[in-house]
Amino acid sequence: TETEEKPLPSCDNETKEIDGEKQTE
């Protein structure tokens, strides 16, 4: 299921970075 939501690793990396920044804020 996780792979289906983010099949591209690049997208996952970008989303993770944004999520991390948002969470830190």
Image: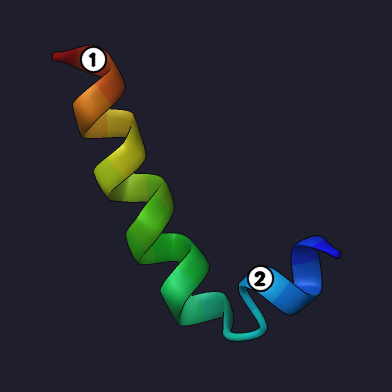
Residue 4: which quarter of the image? bottom right
Determine the secondary structure under disc 1. Answer: helix
Q: Identify the disc placed on residue 5.
A: 2
Q: Dot 2, crowdedness within 10 Å: few (<14), some or many (≥20)? A: few
Residue at 58% x, 85% y is 8
- Name above or below for residue 11 compared with residue 23: below
| Residue 24: percent from left, percent from top | 23, 15
Number of numbered discs overlaid on the protein picture? 2
Q: Amino acid at mark 1?
A: Thr
- Name above or below for residue 22 compared with residue 19: above
| Residue 11: percent from left, percent from top | 44, 75
Q: Dot 1, crowdedness within 10 Å: few (<14), some or many (≥20)? A: few
Q: As drawn, which residue projects farthest toward the bottom?
A: 8
Q: CA distance from mark 2 to mark 1?
A: 23 Å
Q: Choose between 5 and 8: the one closer to the eye.
A: 5
Residue 14: which quarter of the image? bottom left
Q: Amino acid at mark 2?
A: Glu
Q: Identify the disc placed on residue 24.
A: 1
Q: As drawn, which residue projects farthest toward the left?
A: 25
Residue at 78% x, 61% y is 2
Residue at 57% x, 77% y is 9
Q: Earlier in the sequence, mark 2 or mark 1?
A: 2
Residue at 45% x, 79% y is 10
